[in-house]
Image (cartoon, helix red, strand yellow):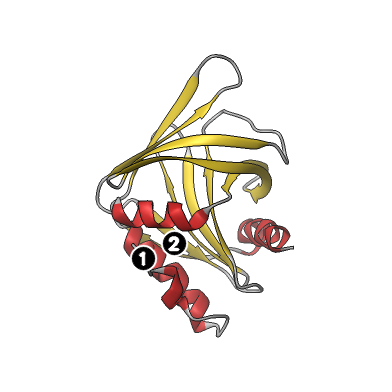
Amino acid sequence: MFRRIITLGIVVFCLIGSSLAHAGDWVVESNRDITEAITRNSNGSALGYACSRASDECLFFFTPNKLKCTEGSHYTVLINGGNHNNSQSTVCRRLGAGDGHEFANVFENSNDLRKQLLNADDSTIGIARGTGSDEFTVSKFGMRGFQSAFDKVNRQRGERGDRNDRNDRNDR
């Protein structure tokens, strides 16, 4: 249900517009349903954090440029940065974007990822995903301003009375 709300909200961004704020390498967008922080690298890959105001959940997502995924399929990615290296499981979900639909790798264990991304603030993080053949694609993202963008997303969600964001920053 939550993922459908996020999907709908991202589509609504495109249809009714949104407010926009910059935080270093990150952009925070908000409308009445969804608030998200997103960064894109020079190749067009994206890393983002989105929260639905209709639920008490948020998700992290990754869209590697020109690397497709099959909806519902699971992929493992390798992440390096924030003084950590680890692997994360993702599931491919359809997220509405721009002039059509965009598939994204949605992280299944966002608590560990959140800690790693907060530790990587003001540095760079690399994410590698298998291509389906014998290669990997690597995407690097500037993390300057992530903590500010992350906090802004949680504050905006909290201002709507949906939840208390204190737990989102615990255990860095």
Up-down relation of residue 134 to residue 118 (above or below): above
Secondary structure at badge 1 equals loop
* Residue 147 image offset from top left, x and y in percent: 33, 62
- Horizontal arrangement in the rendering, residue 32 relative to residue 39 (left or right): right
Q: Quadrant of residue 70?
A: top right
Residue type beneath disc 2: Val
Q: Quadrant of the N terminus?
A: bottom right
Can you identify the residue that label 1 sits on? 171
Residue that appears at 56% across and 28% down: 66
Percent across and percent down for residue 161 are: 55, 85
Crowding near the residue tagged with mark 1, few <14, some 14–19, many ≥20 C-alpha atoms within 10 Å = few
Alpha carbons under labels 1 and 2: distance apart: 23 Å
The one of 67 and 172 positioned closer to us in this rendering: 172
- Rendered location of residue 7, percent (x, y): 68, 56
Q: Say above or below: 75 vs 8.
A: above
- Quarter holding the C terminus is bottom left
Label pair 1/2, CB-CB below 8 angstroms? no
Look at 46% across and 71% down and name the residue there: 154
Q: Which residue ends up furthest to the left in the rendered image? A: 122
| Of residues 109 and 37, the one drawn nearer to the viewer in this rendering | 109
Residue hosting label 2: 28
Residue type, mark 1 in image: Asp
Q: Give the structural element (helix, strand or loop) at label 2.
A: strand
x 59%, y 67%: residue: 57
Query: Splitting the image into 4 quarters, where does residue 52 fall?
Result: bottom right
Pointer 1 or 2: first along the chain: 2
